[in-house]
Amino acid sequence: MTAHAENINYLKTTRGLKSWLTTVDHKRIGLMYLASILVFFITGGLYAMLFRLELWSPEKNFLTPDQYNNFFTLHGVIMVFLVVVPGIPGALGNFVLPLQIGAKDLAFPKLNLTSLYLYWIGAALAIISLFAGHADSGWTFYAPYSLSKNPAVLWMLTAAFILGFSSILTGLNFIVTIHKMRAPGMTWFRMPLFIWALYATAIMQVFATPVLGITLILLLVENFFHIGIFDPALGGDPILMQHFFWFYSHPAVYIIVVPGFGIASELISAFSKREIFGYKFIAYSSVAITIIGFLVWGHHMFVAGQSEVADTIFSFLTFFTAIPSAIKVFNWTTTLYKGSISLQTPMLYGLQILFNFTIGGLTGIILAILSVDIHLHDTYFVVSHFHYVAMGTTMIAFIGGVHYWWPKMTGKMFNEFWGRLASILVFIGFNTTFFVQLIMGSQGSPRRYYHYLKEFQIYHQISTTGILILATGLFMALINLLLSLRGPSNAPQNPWGARTLEWEVAETPPVLFNFKETPVVTHGPYEFATEKS
Amino acid sequence: MDMELPGHTYSFKVLGQVYVSLIVLSALMVGFAMLPMEKLPIDWLDLHLVKRLLILGVAVAMAGIVAGFLMGLKYEKSKLNAVVFLTNFAFLLIFLLFVLADISFRGAMDPSFTKQLNWKSPVNAEEGSSGEASH
Amino acid sequence: MSTATAGSLQEHEVAHHFEDLEQEFESHRFGMWLFMASEIMMFGALLTGGLFLLYLHPDAFAQGRAHLDWRLGALNTFFLLTSGFTMARAAAFAQKAEQGKVRTNLLLSLALAAGFLVVKCIEYKAKFHHGLLPGNAFHGAGFTSPHAHIFFGYYFVTTGLHALHVLVGMGLMIWCLKVSNRVRFTRAYYTPVEMAGIYWALVDLVWIFLFPLLYLVG
Ligand SMILES: [Cu+2]
């Protein structure tokens, strides 16, 4: 690479498919993640639409029960392992992290590319599974459902294992980069909150994902050699499998949602033109969520047959997660107070996060109560709670983040009118889909059932209508973004007037090594001029 | 060289001492295991457990030596990697304790519950019939 | 073995995105440690599962252990500890820029690791011979516990996974040998040997817990 190449726009340094596939530039890798994740988001979403349409009426419409089980499994596996877990760190984190801390790249650029390839391999295995039969174990792979040597499930297990590896390597890369590669003057408390969130996430990726890895290995071995660790028919303990699985998968919920919190902090502060309220509290609350997140996995097993003593401990500890979550919600709300709020597209998503996560978080506390959970367990209430967090918070943050950083990534501005309209449709569609599920669940409608009682039909129909509105909004947003690519490169360096490095110092789009010279940081990430009186 | 040198300088003498102590400790571990402790006339103590704890203690000591000297935790200027290592054990301890909180109290409040779920007698018509020796 | 003459070796160059050697070394070491952390979590969870099974089926573990030869386990412990020692010596010689002795120690470690695998094969073969196998393949004689097969299932999974790590570690040693043909190790640059050494120490670390759990306790 010539010295001259370092100072031009990263999209133009080299050309051709091969230059993308062999790149070690974190920005290009981020964009490739973004494209892949969008593809799987659409795929997983289509499965959801199909089985929601099937649920329009209690009797069979166009899916067999077997296909129905298969579709919700595919929806779950694709959305969890291919979309929400790698989503924000892989696509936005990769692109933004080095820019926000003033580094030339991640600490291990080749390893970063390896993560992407592992992601693709995992995705390919998941696709093989689609053709290998009907994966029907649910995304949780509970024993003994996952022990019937169903080839589709076996491919899915392998896919999830590889994807876990990809996730570990991304996390590892982020932690080292944040510790070792910050620009001069970028102290820990000058880091944007998105970085704090990615840091907390990365800790969970590195420490929890290996437990998922060993769980999946044991399930595979159990399938082939019947070692009897998890299989009750051989003297094993299926509850042990659930301990293993949830030791990862509860922290995984925070792997999913904490980066979304990070984006919320960026959006709400940037579009209120106001220093974020309680910066340190938000930063520490991300770390606190990480630690508490490792202590509460048993709340998924209240009715599975684990001991009452463990139930009580886990229930008690679960309440503590409310504290850091509430700190964030209150601090974001206080940031809005007396801010000069501009309701541009990314901010509309930021406000949705605030609304949706409040519902998602509070329903979580309801579920943590032992006696209530006995009633609500495995009902639509849980489904709705989870979607308010994973979709309503994380994916909304993802979409908001994509809009926010889109000008930096591509150099193009999207159409503001269609962007806002799409965001409003997403809000209406999402809440229509999932709010009724809370009501339906509280009345005892079980999840994952193919047939249901006639009384619940109206709720199912509202929910299905909601998903159609949601899909319209999402496609509108996507088309709006893609159309901007055909437009002029009109994005200014700092269209939102934000104070973080990627907007203030880096060009739009950034040069190959991000900055023409290493930036020296002299102020915090949210010090807006209005603040100084 | 004007810049700081990376890492720490290895000492052959220390490495030798580390090696010898690891070998001695593993011999000690085997020794503890061979000790016919359960024959001692003590009934107020679970001697099996004592033996296991002794062996575990030796293993932890060996792990400490490996991590400290062979993996270099002892020589770190910033204790970052040591923190990572300790975090590991904290999380694993949590995992172990909570799993134990489950298994050792199953059926403690409602014994019939475990019976309904048939926890302890899952095996197994096939295995018995496959000619396995049994009581 | 030293094929390359001193003159043909290159000096290491710091990668473009790092400021200096120290930052590069510290980043690599930290990254390696985080990877080790994830390995420790994986094996740690597996060992926790083992303790769980020990609690659930103590008789199966007691009878299963009686069929493992602790002397072979102890021999393998000796092999691993000694190879850990030679790997550390390789790093120490790399710091002194004694390329030849680095290679000798790497080769020694490689031989000891291979010895470990040979002993493992002998053990596996005996298990196959006596039908001490997981699940339905189990047809060992003289067991009163109906769950003895679980012990052997667990034995094969843990030792198999550990053996896989031994193989990867051997791969890293071979990689270090290759690098030593190309790049000069000095006090300022010995990263590859250090990284392989850390990985190999982890293989030791896991064995230190596996050995008593499988061969001694039960
Ligand atoms: Cu949870």
Image (cartoon, helix red, strand yellow):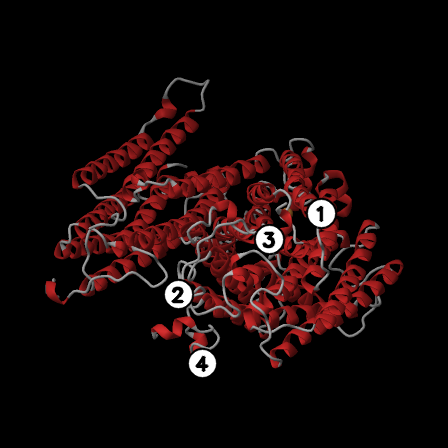
Left/right of residue A456 with respect to residue A9 in the rendered view: right
For label 2, the residue is A110
> Which mark is first along the chain, 1 or 2?
2
Identify whether C188 is placed above or below A326. below
- Label 1 SS: helix
Point out the frontmost of discs 2 and 1: 1
Report which residue position mark 1 lands on: A333
**According to the image, label 4 marks what residue?**
A15
Tell me the amino acid under the disc marked 3. Answer: Gly
**Badge 1, how many Cα within 10 Å: few under 14, some, many 20+?**
some
| Mark with earlier residue (3, 2) | 2
The secondary structure type at the circle numbered 4 is loop
Q: Closer to the camera: disc 3 or disc 1?
A: 1
Q: Nearer the viewer, mark 4 or mark 1?
A: 1
Q: CA distance from mark 4 to mark 1?
A: 45 Å
Determine the secondary structure under disc 3. helix
The earlier-in-sequence mark between 2 and 4 is 4
CB of mark 4 near ligand 1 (< 8 Å): no
Residue behind label 3 places its C-beta within 8 angstroms of ligand 1: no
Label 4 in the same subunit as label 1: yes
Q: Are marks 4 and 3 in contact (CB under 8 Å)?
A: no
Give how far across and how far down residue B121 sits, in percent.
59, 43
> Can you give x and y, in whole percent of width and height, for residue A123 in the image?
54, 69
Q: Give me the C-alpha separation between circle 3 and circle 1.
A: 15 Å
Q: Nearer the viewer, mark 3 or mark 2?
A: 3
Which class describes the residues within 10 Å of circle 2: few (<14), some (14-19), or many (20+)? Answer: some
For disc 2, the chain is: A
Q: Residue under circle 3?
A: A262
Q: Is residue C146 visible?
A: yes
Instruction: Please state which amino acid type lies under the numbered disc 4.
Output: Arg
Q: Are marks 3 and 1 on the same chain?
A: yes
